[in-house]
Amino acid sequence: MKTKIFLNLAVKDLNKAVAFYNELGFSTNPKFTNEKGACIVIDENIFVMLLVEEFYKTFTKKQICDASKASEVLISISLDSREKVDETIQKAIKAGGTDYIEAKDYGWMYQRTFLDVDGHHWEVFYMDESQIPNEM
């Protein structure tokens, strides 16, 4: 089995969170979806498990971070082009997310940031690895 990444995020309203990610163009895997959580497919090896807060609490002894007030994690995904980055931000805004930080253009990398409906911090970027400077 190939290594897969499963990001687990606590959500307040599962249906609202699922709708948000579906609006971004990500599908839901019904095999791993019920009233307690949903599996969002980002890529063949990358998944986001949206877990209702009460269910999320069964996996940890720690308090759940209120992602709208505190930073818990920065989630970054690469996309195929600058245009896809801009499209994703527009989809996020239309679906109820927030355009969080002004776009950053480093020449070799273009990055934008959105917050999902629960305040989780997502960075989407396009990077042309052939243009990375020798010295950073």
Image (spheres, rainbow, N blue to C red):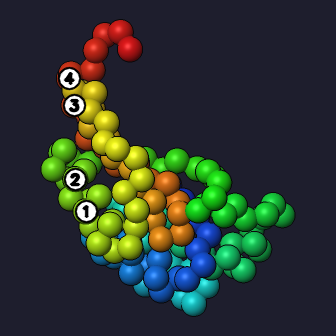
Q: Which residue is mark 4?
A: 130
Label 1 vs 3, first from the N-terminus: 1
In contact (CB < 8 Å): disc 3 and disc 4: yes
Judge whether residue 46 can be spotted in this image.
Answer: no
Q: Which residue is mark 1?
A: 90
Amino acid on which the number 2 mark rests in the picture: Asp
> Which one is closest to the eye, mark 1 or mark 3?
1
Q: Which mark is residue 86?
A: 2
- Alpha carbon of mark 1 to alpha carbon of mark 3: how far? 22 Å
Q: Which mark is residue 128?
A: 3
Left-right relation of 68 to 90: right
Query: Where 110 sits versus 13, above or below?
Result: above
> Which one is closest to the eye, mark 4 or mark 1?
1
In contact (CB < 8 Å): disc 2 and disc 1: yes
Judge whether residue 106 can be spotted in this image.
Answer: yes
Label 2 residue SS? helix
**Percent x, y of residue 94:** 29, 72
In contact (CB < 8 Å): disc 1 and disc 3: no
Query: Where 109 sits versus 62, above or below?
Result: above
Label 4 residue SS? helix
* Residue at image coords 48%, 50%: 75
Left-right relation of 42 to 56: left
In contact (CB < 8 Å): disc 3 and disc 2: no
Amino acid on which the number 4 mark rests in the picture: Ser
In contact (CB < 8 Å): disc 4 and disc 2: no
